[in-house]
Image (tube, helix red, strand yellow):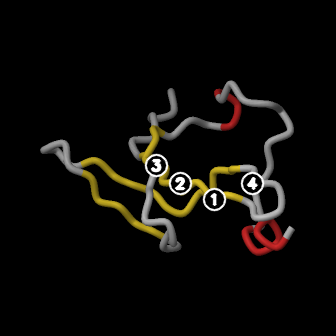
Amino acid sequence: MERAKKNYKVVYTIVERRRDKKKFWLRIGAAFPNRDGSLNVHLDATPVNGQLQIRDYQPLSERGGSSGEEAVDLAAALAS
């Protein structure tokens, strides 16, 4: 049986590190499409910059990024 495709989007905010001004994407929630095309957005954190990036979900195995991707510890990233 084929596995059902995930029908949700991932919510990110883009955070700039103080030390080197490098920007990174921080996952802060998920969004679920409604039948009328609108989205229900569920946030685990509130971005201080007020900006959200909502993208289609892609499993790690299907992403075109580097193989060295890892989760980011927000407190450590901002402090460094």
Identify residue for label 4: 21
Q: Amino acid at mark 2?
A: Tyr
Residue 32 left/right relative to 47: left
Task: Please tell me whether mark 2 sits on a helix, a strand or a loop.
Answer: strand
* Residue found at the far left of this picture: 36
Q: Residue at x 83, y 62 (%)?
A: 19
**What label sits on residue 56 in the rendered view?**
none
Identify residue for label 3: 53
Task: Please tell me whether mark 3 sits on a helix, a strand or a loop.
Answer: strand
| Residue 29 position within the rendered picture, expressed as x and y whole percent measured from the top left | 49, 62
Would you place residue 72 above or below residue 46 in this image? Answer: above
Identify residue for label 2: 12
Q: Amino acid at mark 1?
A: Val
Q: Disc 2 versus disc 1: distance between alpha carbons? A: 9 Å
| Residue 54 position within the rendered picture, expressed as x and y whole percent measured from the top left | 43, 47
Q: Earlier in the sequence, mark 4 or mark 3?
A: 4
Q: Nearer the viewer, residue 64 or 17?
A: 17
Q: Amino acid at mark 4?
A: Lys
Q: Disc 4 versus disc 3: distance between alpha carbons? A: 19 Å
